[in-house]
Image (cartoon, grey):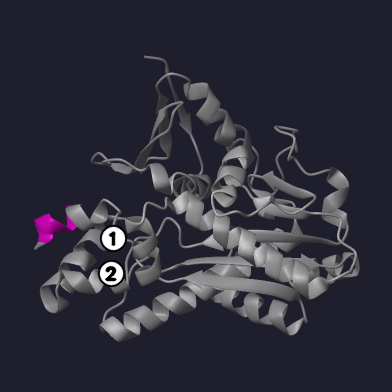
Amino acid sequence: MPQSVHVIPSETIEKMQRHYADSVTNTPKGAIFRAKTPNAVITAYKSGKVLFQGKAPAAEANKWVSDSAAQATSKPPLKTVHSFTPPHALFNDSHAGSDEAGTGDYFGPVTVACVYVKKEQIKTLKHIGVQDSKNLSDTTIRRLSKEILNFNITYSLLVLRNEKYNTLKTRGWSQGKMKAMLHHHTINNVLKKIGTSPLQGILIDQFCEPVLYNKYIASENAKIAKNTYFMTKAESYSIAVACASIIARASFLNEMDELSCNLGLTLPKGASIQVDKTIAKIISKKGKNILNRCAKTHFINTTKAEKYL
């Protein structure tokens, strides 16, 4: 069976975990996650090594290896990988961008934000420190989110809380479809708000192939907006996506704080062994049904937590 192994930075592995959240399978000991796609099985280890094996491992590895090879202080070269790749000029002009948070976390909701940035606002937003939220602490994310909103930015934020998330899952919706529809609605909300304001395009931080995104929204009789583009690591290029990333992440953090307060214990982020132990504590104190209100119950962590009961 063809396979390859690459050492990938932790921030990229976190992005991979969110990207493959809907394809996760049983994770072996010592691994962060394992996901199965039509091309390959991807196993990311705590050491930073990621194993790609299967029919076409290079097809999956190439999505991440070229990005991780770049230095943290520099941007990877922009390549035209599909017909939805944005033009270079977009990043320095008036445009909208959308991103999400919480998709790889067992506890908490999925939050999606879309932000419209005018050409003349880009410099100021960069000056106050807006950048990829994965490079920022939670404290900085909360502060920047407030500053962005005080900047009179046009945006839309949607929160898919756990009860609705789990209901959609039982109805057959994949997490990918949920994210696609959230992005679609936030984008439409922003388009309605800005009216005839200058707009060179809309950039979505790519979480699935554009063809699949179109399939997801078409299943709900929706159509993609004109001049919509997709790219991975979009928040490294687009100030609009970076703003959306920060707003979505700040919202997720606030939602986690509220859930923690209601449950009387601090809910950990991610999907680690610490999460498994916390699940067991919650079940012991409040019963398993409470998970429907605070967790994405289809994650394998629900089963893994049983050994700690």
Relative placement, left or right, of 165 versus 150 is left
77 vs 108, nearest the viewer: 108
Q: Earlier in the sequence, mark 1 or mark 2?
A: 2
- Tag on residue 297? 1
Whole-percent x and y of residue 87?
83, 43
Work out whether residue 42 or residue 127 is closer to the camera in this orientation and state it: 42
Label 2's element? helix
Residue at image point 78% right, 82% down: 152
| Residue 193 coordinates in the image, percent (x, y) | 77, 75
Q: Please, what is the dominant secondary structure of the magenta stretch? A: helix
In what quadrant of the picture does the C terminus appear?
A: bottom left
Q: Quadrant of the N terminus?
A: top left
Q: Is residue 217 magenta?
A: no
Q: The magenta stretch spans which residues?
A: 304-308
Whether residue 129 is visible here, answered yes or no, is: no
Residue 307 is covered by the magenta coloring: yes
Please give left or right for residue 128 compared with residue 124 in the image: left
